[in-house]
Image (tube, rainbow, N blue to C red):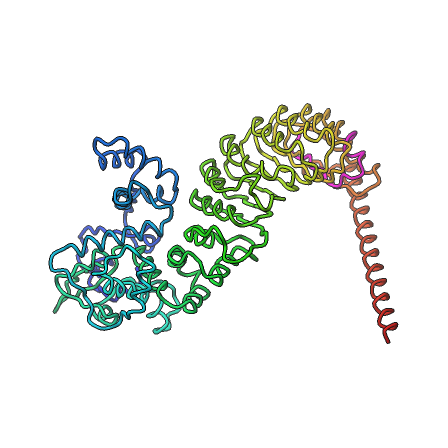
């Protein structure tokens, strides 16, 4: 609980700390992220609806109207951000109401959803008897009102001034009061007093219900009662704040975006949805957050999606989209990435450890351009650890088809795509002559999968790095691969944990270690025994070039193994010294050439 809340209600704090009513049972509701701060004896999480509950709720909302039920359910599945909101009953009711009032069509963005919700709420309020504006000062200028009409076209004119002041109140909760008081923490002000409302120009009366957006809370404290106000939900405050920022000048918007983006991301996501990022400067400020980072900014992707910007206000050069994550990438995130790919040329798409699954893959390709319309084919596609199966791979094939002949790096490791999935990949790569790296470790492949990939490289291969570890391909699988890649310029081969025996070791020695391009060979976690290790290391020593052979730890204590590894290490050291000497000579020659040119000029 924030310090502000503790100060506003000391009586409640005494009850919570059990200094009053020690024997009482207290029920406190809280958001999940804040409940850890409470020393509670028991915690109960309200998880909301499950899929069956959503279906039942929708059917009851459209009694005897199966067509509307099916159409609503179909559209809900098309927008994962709306579907995720529907697990909360209140949100689902809001979405259904908007569906009914919008000619049986759901909005494609969350911004549009809240725009319609706010317009519906205000329209309902102005139809009440004795409605009037609650403005006690001329804070809402005519200029701001006109801008508000541009941002929210459906808002009723009878409520526009008071609504604009509510937006200002929401804005000041995030920004003005922070800057005035010099607060360093970034928690927004969510509880307001009557004085705060009056300072914003809002007239407070006993009959006013805050347009259904602002609610009053009566706190019983002696000698007098106090009244505090807060928005009906933090998301409402964030949206209204964004509306107010949208009425400010371009310079003010740009300043807030540059200074506060990382603290109030939802506010700026709404702002981008409201302004559509038509300003070239604003677009560049958001788009630049996808560049120059180790991991691209997911919030920036959401901003671009909410703007629904399909024609950027300025030309875009090809970028690398790097989405390496340690948490799940939601279907909505994948939809945002798909929107970006529809208008932005991307040369490298790296999405490792995102765990977006088959459903995420479906939305990842929703807006992906076709082969005839794509402006920049991919040169690298990496989708390691994403919980994909053959179904998800079927969606990813849309990306593969547009870049099948241009891919130089391809990674599908640790996705259970199986032999059938490997067959799909192989069919797309059959005309590729530039692929340099292929990683399919831990994909549930057998001999059949190994044979599928071997056919691709049977005629000609540019492959340099191949990782098929953690697949039970056995000796037959490694024989098929060796037959296809033995004459290539492959430099790294990873076959760790592939069920290879001494028979497979003989194939490796004959086909790969005899090839002087091979630099790294990983055969750990294979039952090749000590004889197999000796055979591989001796072949490396006899080869005459620097080669690294990774073997099981227990084999390293063998005398012959130690001796051969010392030879290989010394050879590697000599090669590094030679390379260093070559670089020094090149630098010396370059310096002499520059010096000579300067002398000739003089």
Specify the quadrant of the image occupied by residue 464: top right
For the point 41% across and 61% down, the residue is: 263
Specify the quadrant of the image occupied by residue 49: top left
The answer to whether one can see residue 73 in this image is: yes
Residue 125's x, y, as percent?
A: 18, 55
For the point 83% across and 59% down, the residue is: 586
In which quadrant will I find the N terminus?
bottom left
- Please determine whether, in this image, residue 195 is positioned above or below residue 539: below
- Please determine whether, in this image, residue 413 is positioned above or below residue 223: above
For the point 85% across and 73% down, the residue is: 601
Residue 434's x, y, as percent?
A: 69, 40
Q: Is residue 551 left or right of residue 309?
A: right
- Residue nearest the viewer, comparing 520 with 502: 520
What residue range appears in magenta? 509-526
| 517 part of magenta stretch | yes
Q: Is residue 566 left or right of residue 303?
A: right
Q: Is residue 193 left or right of residue 107?
A: left
The answer to whether one can see residue 328 in this image is: no
- Residue nearest the viewer, comparing 474 with 414: 414
């Amino acid at each position: 609980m924030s310090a502000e809340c503790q100060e506003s209600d000391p009586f409640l704090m005494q009850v919570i700390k059990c200094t009053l009513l020690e024997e009482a049972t207290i029920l406190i509701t809280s958001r999940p992220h804040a409940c850890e701060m409470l020393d509670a004896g028991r915690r109960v999480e309200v998880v909301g609806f499950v899929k069956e509950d959503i279906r039942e709720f929708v059917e009851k909302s459209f009694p005897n109207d199966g067509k509307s039920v099916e159409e609503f359910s179909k559209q809900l599945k098309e927008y994962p951000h709306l579907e995720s909101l529907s697990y909360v009953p209140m949100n689902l009711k809001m979405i259904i109401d908007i569906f009914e009032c919008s000619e049986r069509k759901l909005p494609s963005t969350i911004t549009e959803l809240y725009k319609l919700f706010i317009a519906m709420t205000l329209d309902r309020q102005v139809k009440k008897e004795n409605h009037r504006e609650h403005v006690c000062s001329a804070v809402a200028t005519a200029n701001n009102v006109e801008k508000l009409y541009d941002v929210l076209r459906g808002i009723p004119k009878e409520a526009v001034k008071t609504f604009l002041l509510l937006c200002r109140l929401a804005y000041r909760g995030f920004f003005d009061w922070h800057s005035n008081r010099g607060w360093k923490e970034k928690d927004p002000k969510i509880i307001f007093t009557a004085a705060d409302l009056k300072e914003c120009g809002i007239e407070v009366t006993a009959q006013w219900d805050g347009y259904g957006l602002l609610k009053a809370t009566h706190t019983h404290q002696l000698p007098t009662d106090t009244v505090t106000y807060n928005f009906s939900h933090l998301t409402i405050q964030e949206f209204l704040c964004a509306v107010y920022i949208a009425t400010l000048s371009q310079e003010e918007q740009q300043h807030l975006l540059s200074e506060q983006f990382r603290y109030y991301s939802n506010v700026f996501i709404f702002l981008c949805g409201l302004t559509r990022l038509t300003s070239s400067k604003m677009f560049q400020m958001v788009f630049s957050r996808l560049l120059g980072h180790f991991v691209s900014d997911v919030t920036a992707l959401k901003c671009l999606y909410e703007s629904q910007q399909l024609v950027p206000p300025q030309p875009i050069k090809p970028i690398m989209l790097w989405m390496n994550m340690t948490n799940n990438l939601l279907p909505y995130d994948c939809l945002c990435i798909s929107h970006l790919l529809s208008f932005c040329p991307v040369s490298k798409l790296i999405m490792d450890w995102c765990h977006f699954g088959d459903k995420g893959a479906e939305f990842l390709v929703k807006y992906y351009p076709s082969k005839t319309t794509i402006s920049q084919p991919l040169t690298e596609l990496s989708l390691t650890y994403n919980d994909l199966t053959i179904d998800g791979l079927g969606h990813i094939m849309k990306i593969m088809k547009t870049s099948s002949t241009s891919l130089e790096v391809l990674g599908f490791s640790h996705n259970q795509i199986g032999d059938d999935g490997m067959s799909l990949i192989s069919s797309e790569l059959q005309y590729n002559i530039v692929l340099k790296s292929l990683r399919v470790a831990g994909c549930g492949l057998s001999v059949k999968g190994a044979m599928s990939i071997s056919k691709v490289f049977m005629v000609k291969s540019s492959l340099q790095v191949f990782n098929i570890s953690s697949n039970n391909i056995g000796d037959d699988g490694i024989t098929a691969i060796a037959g296809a890649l033995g004459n290539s310029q492959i430099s790294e081969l990873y076959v760790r944990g592939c069920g290879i025996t001494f028979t497979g070791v003989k194939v490796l020695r004959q086909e790969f270690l005899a090839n002087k391009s091979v630099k790294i060979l990983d055969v750990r976690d294979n039952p090749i025994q000590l004889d197999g290790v000796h055979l591989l290391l001796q072949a490396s020593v006899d080869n005459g070039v620097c080669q690294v052979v990774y073997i099981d730890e227990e084999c390293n204590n063998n005398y012959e193994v130690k001796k051969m590894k010392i030879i290989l290490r010394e050879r590697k050291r000599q090669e590094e010294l030679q390379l260093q000497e070559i670089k020094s000579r090149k630098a010396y020659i370059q310096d002499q050439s520059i010096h000579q040119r300067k002398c000739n000029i003089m």
